[in-house]
Every structure is written in structure tokens, then in C-alpha cells.
Image (cartoon, helix red, strand yellow):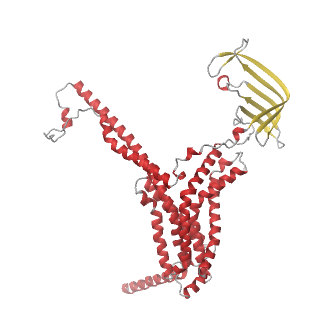
Amino acid sequence: MKKLDKLILKSFWGPFVITMSVVVFIFLMKIMIFYIDDFVSKDLGFMDYAQLFFYFSLITVPTALPLAMLLSSLMAFGNLGEFFELTAIKSAGISVTRAMLPLFIVAVGISIFSFFFNDRISPWANLKGYSLLYDIKTAKATLKIKEGIFYNDLPGYSIKVDKKLDNGKLIGMVIYKHDQRAYEVGNTQIILADSGRMYSIHNNGYLVIELYNGTMYNDLVNNTNRNTSYVSTATNETRPSNFQRNSFKHYKLVESLASFGVKRTNEDQFKYHEFMKNIADLSKSADSLGGVYKQGTQNLVPNSRNYFTYQYRQPSKVPIEKGKWIDSLLQVSVKDSMKVEIVKNAHSAATSMGSYAESNYSYLQGQLKDANKYKLEIHHKYTQAISCLIMFLIGAPLGAIIKKGGFGVPVLVSIIFFILLYVLTIQGDKFVKDGLLEVAVGAWLANSILLVVGLYFVDRARSDSRLFEKDNYQMVIKKIKGKIASRFQKTTLIQS
């Protein structure tokens, strides 16, 4: 390896690591802001957040690699141009394309790494990350009672507090305690207390409710002989009951908080999604759906015969006469009531056939759309990898042309091209899902356009173009103004 290659690689790896870290952090913050409502008031431990951040960091790597490649290569060659190192390289007889060779090899290596990352690690990280996110979203919020509002998330209880003091004391507590028959007989136990407090014990495993100076009302519904009775709100039946009232100065309730923890769902429930599959699984699913679509189209005509009433005969040698022969059937001398019956049957058969055709069309289009989704994801495994190489072909020559390092102009240019890549990718996917483009054409649309742009910039860098220099455009504008002024003077002289 020559000293020139070491110089260029040294100027590349520093910005690459920094930009990669920054981009992953930005994508993580985007995800956290998007799901912030699902994290608030949840009893999540440090390990839950650590696992979630780890999985989603892996998920963002394929998206961050092209942007990091674009920005770091642009900064590397921009710094070389800004400090006239690139000029010295050219004066030594070394072309720009030769100077780009070591980073080109690195870009190829990163593209290969990105492909295997997309095919092996990304499906695993998507499965782990989104299944954990689902479990967090479905977990109950921690006990958070508001003043004057009944809290019903604690299983078996409805709790209302009139006022909450800063020292944790609760004033004016009303507790409805439900049993397993609450749906049939309603709330049979009510606790009223002047004050109380709530706290957890055993590492938030149990909730303790301490009540002071209150009364407990209990209506025991049973089948024994009692003088009083209870009317069920669900069945409207009259049942014997026994009403009890007990006063207390201090009363303590202990309930489990197991339902508030994060419970892990079986990950097999999420494996159907295309983001959770590698290329082999995607190909298998796409082929299966394609087979269903092909079989459905082949069976459409044979199955349609069930909706018609006719007698099949071998075609005779006598050709059918031209004309509206179906309408002529209505001219046959039959009773009017029979004609009405024939028309009704024909209309019913046509309506059934239309519904059958419409439902089959929707079903087959759904199968085709799902198959295209899997095929599209297969192509994206390759397009995301190749985009790293294409971003290098844009970033490196742009840096040599702009000759600006740092995080100013390179960041602005990188964001523009990354947004262009993102928009073209989304638009290509939309065209594929709408059936306007073939899967391969829509998937490779963004890369094809940006590859042409990258090759153009490489050609401009080889010819030492002044594409982004301000004085170049000032001279062009000055020439245009001069031509317009000279033509205006000639027109004035002709008119005079």
C-alpha cells in the first residue's frame, strides 16, 4: 500500500465512524420520538431499554451505511481539495480516479458487508426489536392515579382519590372491589376511607394500599335462606344476599403487580412479515403466493360454469347464425310469466357471476400484491447494498469538485442526495404496488438514476470541472448579460 492510499484512507475512516454514529443516533431518536407515548408510564427496566436500543440500532445500520458512505467520502476528498493536497496529487501525475481507487475498494467491501447484514442480521434484529416493541406497547401503564377520576387498570379494583398531597398521602379514597361474579351481580364490596397511601414492595412486585378511618360495605350474594334479596343487573334474577358494614381505623390491602410487567409474546407470530425474512424465506413465500395466483387464474373459468344453467353439447357442424341470438330467445312463443321467470333467473345468474368475479379479482390481486411485496424486499437486499457503492461514486467526485471539507457544505449536499435516494425508492415501491412497474424496474429505479448522476460527477472530476465554483457561474451570467445588452443596442439602432 502506497503512502497516498494510507493518506486517503486515514482521511476517510474518521468521518465515516463519526457520521455512522451520528446517523444511527438520529434514526434512534426518530424512533423514540415516534413511540414516546408507548414508553411513558410503563414499568420498564434498564435492560428493556438497552435491548430495544440495541435491536433498533442494528435495524438502522443498512439505512445509515449509504448516507455515512456519501458524507465521509465527500468530506475526505473535500478536505484534500481544500488544503490543496488534491492539487499536489494531480501535479504529481496521479489522476483523480487513481486517488479514488482505495476508497472504491472500501466501498465494494462495505457493499458486500451491507448485503450480508441485510440478509442475515437485519431480519433477526427486526423480529427481536418489533416483537419487544409490541410487548412494551401492550404492557399496562404503571399505577398512576389522577384526582377525581376512577383508575381501572388494577385488576379487580376501581379506585378514586379526591386529593393527592405532596407527601404521598391520599385524601378521600373510594375503592370498588370486584370479584369474579362482578358482571352478574355488580360491585358487591365498597371501601370508603378518609385518607390512605399506596406504595410498592418486593421490587415493584406487589402493591400495598393502606387505608385510615373508613368503612367497608360488603354485600355477600349466596343461595342460603335470607330475609333480604339482591336483583342481578345481568340476568334480572332475584337472589338472596347478606349485607355487612365494618368500620376500621387502619386497613391494609396487598395486590400483585404481575400484570403490569412486560410479557414476551411468541416471536413466531411476527415471522410472516417480509422484514423478518431472509432471501431464502422471501423467495419461498413469493413462489408460494405466485403459485396460488397462477392456480386461481387457471380455475377462474372452470369454476365460473357453476353459475350458469345450460346443457353442454359437442359443437355441431352447423355454424351458429350471426345476430343477437340471445335476445331472439325472448321472442319464442311462451307465456309471459315464463318470460319473467327466465329473465329473473338470468339476472340472478349474472349478478352471482359478477360477485364471484369481483371477489376472485380482489383475492387474486391481494395474492399478487403480497407476492410483489416479498419480491420487492428481495431486490431491496441488493439495492441497499449497491447504494453504498453508488453513494461513493457521488460523494468522492463531488468532494474533489467542491473542495470543501468539514460538516458545512458536505452535510447539505449529502442530505439532498440522501433525500433524493429515499424519495425515488419510495416512489419506485409505490409504482410496483400499484402495478404500474415491474418489480425489478421499480426496485432499481433509484439506484439507476443516481448511478448516472455519479458517473457524470466522476467524469466532471476527471476533467477538473469548475461545476460548483461561484466565479464560473458569474462569468457565464456576465456573458449572457453582455449578449442581451448588445442585442438590445442593435435593436435600438435599427429602430432609430
The image quadrant that residue 314 belongs to is top left
Q: Nearer the viewer, residue 5 or 139?
A: 5
User: Percent from the top left, x then y, of residue 124?
Assistant: 58, 53
Image height check: is 222 above or below 324? above
Left or right: 377, with 254 as reference point: left
**Percent of width and height locating residue 242:** 75, 17
Where is residue 331? Give x, y as percent: 17, 31
In the rendered view, would you say 103 is above or below 343?
below
Foreground residue among 53 and 245: 53
Residue drawn at point x = 73 percent, y = 20 percent: 220
Q: Viewer-proximal residue, 484 or 249?
A: 249
Q: Residue at x 70, y 40 (%)?
A: 260
Which image quadrant for residue 262? Answer: top right
Identify the residue shown where x is 56% and y is 64%. 113
In the displayed structure image, the side of residue 53 where residue 202 appears, left or right: right
Looking at this view, name the residue that lies furthest to the right.
249
In this rendering, position of residue 379 left or right of residue 56:
left
Question: Seen in the image, is 364 located left or right of residue 320?
Answer: right
Return the residue found at the far left.
318
The quadrant of the rendering that contains the C terminus is bottom left
